Image: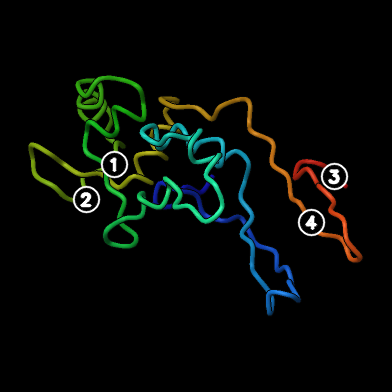
Amino acid sequence: MLVKLGFIAPAGSVDIEYKHHGGVTTVPLYNAEEVALLPVVWPGVDWRAARTVAGGRRSPLAGLAPVVPGEYRLLLAGVAQIARVGRAAVVQWRRRHDDFPAPVGGTDVHPQFDRAAVLAWLLAHDKIEVPTRTPTASLLMACHGGGTRTFRLDDPF
């Protein structure tokens, strides 16, 4: 599983040509398991609001972009929030596990950790798990001559 920047990295992409929009648009494709992890990885996001944002409105996810591209960092409290434990538990994990990610910044009192490295460690040590019920996704396509067709992305056809 590739977790990139605390968000997810596309597993691939597909090019869709919109003749009336003036060209080809590349649409990224994501692994359903990684998408299911988003609410675990970002517990502070109102996911209901993110799913129901109206067209033309700013998504609550837009505020998650890092100030410096490529840098998503967590404090001990952030790690604890993702793992749904207290900050003291994270301090103990750091002491007891030699493979806990090293700080990438901050101070001795308030160390900062790379979000992707922490997520990989939490998953490897069963501190968090992928939700078992992954949301279904669909692709709505306009047909030539009018009408639309909906495809479930987990549907083999």
Observer-side mark, 2 or 1, equals 2
Q: Which residue is drawn at 40% across and 25% down?
A: 127
| Cα distance in 3D space between marks 1 and 4 | 43 Å
Residue 101, numbered circle: 1
Compare residues 154 and 100 and report the one nearer the observer. 154
Q: Which residue is drawn at 61% across and 50% down?
A: 30
Q: Mark 4 packing: few (<14 Cα in 10 Å), some, or many (20+)? A: few
Residue marked by disc 4: 141
Q: In this view, does 92 lie above or below 43?
A: above
| Cα distance in 3D space between marks 2 and 1 | 9 Å
Residue 146: horizontal and vertical position, in percent? 88, 61
Observer-side mark, 1 or 4, equals 4
Q: Which amino acid does label 3 sit on?
A: Pro
Q: Mark 3 packing: few (<14 Cα in 10 Å), some, or many (20+)? A: few
Label 3 vs 4, first from the N-terminus: 4
Q: What residue type is labelled 4?
A: Met
Label 1 vs 3, first from the N-terminus: 1
Q: Do the residues labelled 2 and 4 touch (CB within 8 Å)?
A: no
Q: What residue type is labelled 1?
A: Pro
Q: Mark 2 packing: few (<14 Cα in 10 Å), some, or many (20+)? A: few
Residue marked by disc 2: 104
Residue marked by disc 3: 156
| Cα distance in 3D space between marks 1 and 3 | 39 Å
